[in-house]
Amino acid sequence: MRITFLGTGTSQGVPMIACDCEVCLSADKRDKRLRSSIMLEDEGRVVVIDTGPDFRYQMLRENVKRLDAVVFTHAHKDHTAGLDDIRAFNFRQQAPIDIYADVRVQEALRREFYYIFSDYKYPGIPEINLHTITNAPFEAAGIRLVPIEVLHYKLPVNGFRLGEFTYITDAKTISATEREKIKGTRILVINALQKQQHISHFTYDEAIAFAQEIGAETTYFTHISHRLGKYVDVMPELPPGIELAYDGLKIEV
């Protein structure tokens, strides 16, 4: 399976206009962090985890021609706002897209994309098949995912394990029970927002401690704000086996 990091950034702490910090002005492509999302490709099937506001550009950048399913971690707009743009895949494939979300996310989607769920289907709106995520393993386009519940302050968020790969974003607290689901992971992706304390995200130090507890062969940090610093500056500081992910990074699992 190939995994592509579509985005490794966050809306948290990111100035939207006229930022003159070193990261935002960096010429290094690894510092250009769109909102966090990954794409799973396996035997021609394509699954995306989260469709943030940058979803359309991310699909164009990666030249994605097919989309079989979308899986949502939680309902915040930096992870759901791009849902409308699946309509291009509806048109190309002439079929609905399977959407996997827990009840909280489904409530937000029904509220924010009400026209998708209306009785009258306006021509050209996104077409979806909605599936409910519980705490049980499930398959999306034939790819088996095990939900891992983490807390984003007080909001439950789903991470996912796929075989030896685990993807978690927007975590601040992870219970002992859920940590057991992660153990044995070979490749771990975890959020590391910034070095300063934050109420709802792992900091740099907290993410390092968590990565070392899990003991994955390789850990990638994602959901990174500009406050963490430039790629070339942060990478030498990281312990062995821990790296910063960057937009466009591809790994095989």
Image (cartoon, helix red, strand yellow):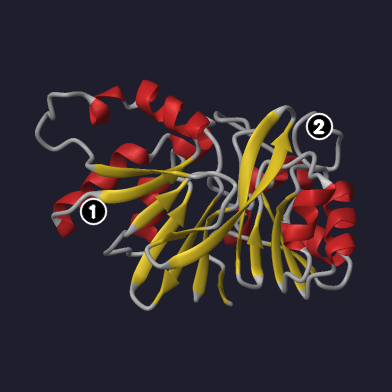
Give SS at disc 1: helix
Q: Residue at x 63, y 50 (%)?
A: 159
Label 2 environment density (alpha carbons within 10 Å; few <14, some 14–19, many ≥20): few
> Residue 2, percent across and down?
49, 74
Q: Nearer the viewer, residue 152 or 239?
A: 152
Give me the C-alpha separation between circle 1 and circle 2. 37 Å
Using the image, determine if residue 125 lies above or below residue 167: above
Q: Amino acid at mark 1?
A: Phe
Give SS at disc 2: loop
> Residue 28, percent across and down?
62, 60
Whether the residues at callouts 1 and 2 have beta carbons within 8 Å, the answer is no
Residue, disc 2: 198
Is any atom of residue 13 visible in this view? no
> Residue 238, percent across and down?
86, 63
Q: Nearer the viewer, residue 30 or 81?
A: 81
Is any atom of residue 43 visible in this view? yes
Q: Residue at x 42, y 34 (%)?
A: 81
Specify the label residue 242 is tagged with.
none
Specify the label residue 89 is tagged with.
1
Dot 1 or dot 2, earlier in sequence: 1
Residue 21 falls in which quadrant of the image? top right
Specify whether 136 is left or right of 80. right
Specify whether 124 is left or right of 228. left
> Residue 31, percent across and down?
63, 54
Split into 4 quadrants, where in the image is the C terminus?
Answer: bottom right
Q: Nearer the viewer, residue 233 or 54?
A: 54
